[in-house]
């Protein structure tokens, strides 16, 4: 099935690149893959070039022909060694108590927040994309441009990072939150 949308969100291109890489790893031609999957090789060529949006059934047939799970076709390929260990005593905290926890380009950005005070910072922050704040220990308040959200241990708040925001602890000195930025 061809996509009627001239612009894609990258899904078709990413899926196509994974199909092409796996097909080549297995030494298959487009015709060979088409025969195994029961799909036409012109259609598979369009899938590989990101010009077609295959149905779930077609993706299942392609995955079976390549002898991989459907999830492997849907999820992005991780390049190189992406394992990174950040020790609890590594990294500096900024003036708002935020410590970067590393990461790879394109992956969500992880930060740990632990405040030294119960006072609101004077300045609001903004960030691109969606943010999720998880109260890992203790409790805190999140001010979203004047609307206060209370988070108890284990609570998560998701919001558009372009909304001016700031944090303050309401729990003990060991209050910590994990901030995940996607976008």
Image (cartoon, grey):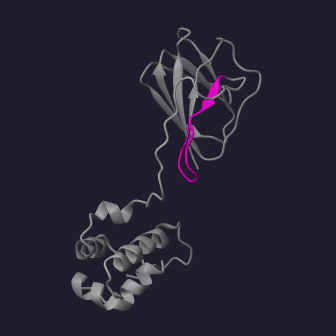
Mark count:
0
Residue 101 lies left or right of residue 70; in this view the side is right
Q: Quadrant of the N terminus?
A: bottom left
Q: Which residue is drawn at 47% across and 67% down?
A: 11
Looking at the image, which is closer to me, 2 or 12?
12
Residue 53 appears in which quarter of the rendering? bottom left
Q: Residue at x 32, y 60 (%)?
A: 71
Query: Residue 38, relative to residue 154: is it above or below?
Result: below
Residue 62 belongs to the span the image colors magenta:
no
Residue 26 appears in which quarter of the rendering? bottom left
Query: Residue 91, relative to residue 61: is it above or below?
Result: above
Residue 65 lies left or right of residue 103; in this view the side is left
Q: Which residue is drawn at 43% across and 84% down?
A: 46
Q: Residue at x 37, y 87 (%)?
A: 43
Looking at the image, which is closer to me, 172 or 163?
172
Most prominent secondary structure in the magenta stretch? loop
Residue 121 % position (x, y): 72, 20
Task: Provide the residue span drawn in magenta.
Answer: 97-110
Residue 50 % position (x, y): 48, 77
Residue 167 % position (x, y): 63, 23
Residue 108 belongs to the span the image colors magenta:
yes
């Amino acid at each position: 099935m061809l996509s009627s949308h001239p612009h894609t969100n990258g899904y078709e291109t990413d899926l196509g690149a994974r199909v092409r890489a796996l097909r080549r790893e297995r030494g298959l031609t487009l015709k060979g893959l088409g025969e195994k999957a029961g799909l036409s090789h012109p259609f598979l060529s369009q899938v590989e070039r990101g010009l077609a949006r295959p149905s779930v059934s077609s993706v299942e047939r392609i995955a079976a022909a390549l002898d991989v799970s459907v999830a492997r076709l849907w999820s992005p390929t991780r390049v190189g060694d992406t394992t990174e260990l950040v020790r609890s005593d590594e990294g500096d905290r900024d003036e708002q108590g935020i410590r970067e926890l590393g990461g790879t380009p394109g992956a969500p950005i992880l930060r740990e927040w632990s405040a030294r005070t119960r006072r609101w910072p004077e300045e609001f922050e903004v960030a691109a994309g969606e943010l999720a704040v998880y109260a890992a220990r203790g409790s805190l308040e999140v001010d979203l441009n004047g609307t206060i959200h209370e988070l108890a241990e284990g609570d998560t708040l998701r919001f558009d990072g372009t909304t001016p925001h700031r944090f303050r602890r309401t729990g003990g000195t060991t209050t910590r939150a994990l901030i995940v930025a996607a976008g």
